[in-house]
Image (cartoon, grey):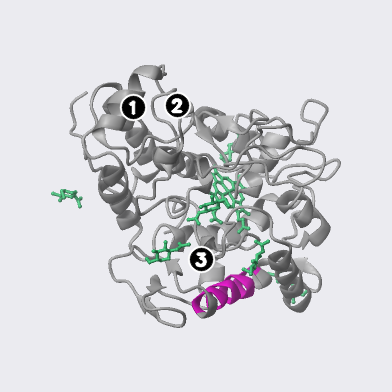
Amino acid sequence: MFSLLNFVTLGLACTWSVLAFPSTYTSLGGLPREELDRILPSLQYRSPGAPPGPLKFNGTKLVNDDQHPWKPLKHGDMRGPCPGLNTLASHGYLPRNGIATPVQIINAVQEGFNMENSVARLVTYAAHLVDGNLITDKLSIGGKSPLTGPSPPAPANAAGLNTHALFEGDVSMTRADAFFGDNHSFNETLFDEFTAFSNQFGAGKYNLTVAAEYRFHRIQESIATNPNFSFVSPRFFTAYAESVFPINFFIDGRQGDGQLDLDVARGFFQNMRMPDGFHRASMPTGLEGLAEIASVHPISPGANVNGVNTYTFDPSSADFTTFCLLYVNFVNQTVRSLYPEPTGNLKKALKKNLEFLYGPFSDQCSQVFPYGKDN
Ligand code: HEM
Ligand SMILES: *[C@@H]1O[C@H](CO)[C@@H](O)[C@H](O)[C@H]1NC(C)=O
Ligand SMILES: *[C@@H]1O[C@H](CO)[C@@H](O)[C@H](O)[C@H]1NC(C)=O
Ligand SMILES: *[C@@H]1O[C@H](CO)[C@@H](O)[C@H](O)[C@H]1NC(C)=O
Ligand SMILES: *[C@@H]1O[C@H](CO)[C@@H](O)[C@H](O)[C@H]1NC(C)=O
Ligand SMILES: *[C@@H]1O[C@H](CO)[C@@H](O)[C@H](O)[C@H]1NC(C)=O
Ligand SMILES: *[C@@H]1O[C@H](CO)[C@@H](O)[C@H](O)[C@H]1NC(C)=O
């Protein structure tokens, strides 16, 4: 069952050392011991808050309201590859600078879009464990301001959710693969393809039929053009999840017919903006539609192993039949490789966040304890 699978990670990319000063939201993952010893004393430990529960009122309601007006970016605001989080920040459901705690992120995706609680927790703690700062309990939703126009862009760095191969990955719908350079900004060429597919398969709307075809097309395109193309867990799961998110979350909850208008889509993807009068989904929603689109053109996890057009199945990757392996590999390999021997508050924070991550898996998978069971 896929109800919980989502974003996670692999790899060890670390552009960290190029930053002269640690910021309070930059990940500490992958840092050598000496670096950690140097940096940790400068950071104030903030004990992670307990994950929020489900919404009390879980129906549709006006969310582009007077308390949450869209505002243009200010210098230094962080935005990244996720149009959902970008939009929540630009409407003030998240801090407008794009730096947030996991608790703020879960509250925002629930309140603003009616994302279902266990999916929200899974995605948020997975992202935070690899891309967030576990000492300060803060995560950047991006790395720099991508919008041209009135707001001056902040200095680029690869912090937060832009960190390629940790959480961000190939075959995004409207963002190019990292191999081609910019992996997080809205890409007009790709949005044109999104539009062309919506015209061809959805009579001018983005719906599940379009999602299945465009997802498959983007995979074929990367196989044929990106020598570095990688499509293994967790990206294998998240790519399908993200293909259904626009249908599940960007359609007005009063409309609910599964047909996303392309101007509305552009508003979210490019301008990080809800339409006037926008109402959130009419019930808590997660990965509805994922299994349906993945079954149209089944593909196994794999990678181009020797240049373009050499896509090869990778049996070590989790796939839709091995959901718990997604969790186990994430914790036991990805997180542990980023933090091989944590001590003190770092170890404490890791264990707490791993506990929070396990919550949404607890009804299906056994817990793994890379840092022991003691407190
Ligand atoms: C709960 C916390 C969330 C986190 C940590 C998160 C993170 C991310 C990340 C890292 C990506 C980039 C993956 C990639 O394309 O390489 C992404 C993509 C995406 N996210 Fe989110 N996301 C969250 C919630 C949401 C919500 C609530 C929505 C919808 C309202 C959403 C909609 C999308 C969509 C549509 C994409 C695909 C963009 C594209 O392919 O062009 N996400 N998200
Ligand atoms: C929505 O809230 C109602 C009332 O509290 C509850 O009975 C229902 O189970 C909730 N729906 C979901 C999907 O959580
Ligand atoms: C947009 O994506 C296309 C296709 O992946 C790529 O060739 C192009 O370089 C990207 N454009 C920008 C401005 O990044
Ligand atoms: C592509 O893969 C090669 C070999 O693994 C690596 O050296 C290079 O950094 C990768 N390039 C990008 C942009 O990911
Ligand atoms: C992703 O894009 C950012 C900004 O363009 C860049 O600094 C970073 O190196 C890219 N990541 C990879 C792996 O190419
Ligand atoms: C998507 O739109 C097309 C064209 O209207 C329609 O034939 C198809 O059934 C729609 N698919 C879904 C899942 O709504
Ligand atoms: C986690 O990794 C450790 C050390 O490599 C190994 O002994 C253990 O069996 C792994 N646990 C699982 C559940 O794979």
Q: Image height check: is 93 above or below 118? A: above
Disc with the residue nearer the chain's start (1 vs 2): 2
Rounded to the nearest whole Å, what is the CA distance between mark 1 and mark 2?
Answer: 8 Å
Mark 3 close to ligand 6, CB under 8 Å = no
Disc with the residue nearer the chain's start (3 vs 1): 3
Judged left or right of residue 56, residue 5 is left
Q: Secondary structure at mark 3?
A: helix
Rounded to the nearest whole Å, what is the CA distance between mark 3 and mark 1?
Answer: 34 Å
Question: Which residue is disc 1 drawn over?
Answer: 349
Judged left or right of residue 153, residue 324 is left
Question: Residue visible at 66% across and 34% down?
Answer: 77
Question: Residue visible at 57% across and 39% down?
Answer: 141
Percent position of residue 12, x then y: 35, 50
Residue 29: in magenta span: no
Residue 182 makes an appearance in the image: yes
Question: Residue visible at 73% across and 77% down?
Answer: 201
- Between 200 and 229, the residue placed more toward the observer is 229
Tell me the crowding category of disc 3: few under 14, some 14 to 19, or many 20 or more residues within 10 angstroms, Cα based.
some
Question: Which residue is disc 3 drawn over?
Answer: 291
Residue 113 makes an appearance in the image: no
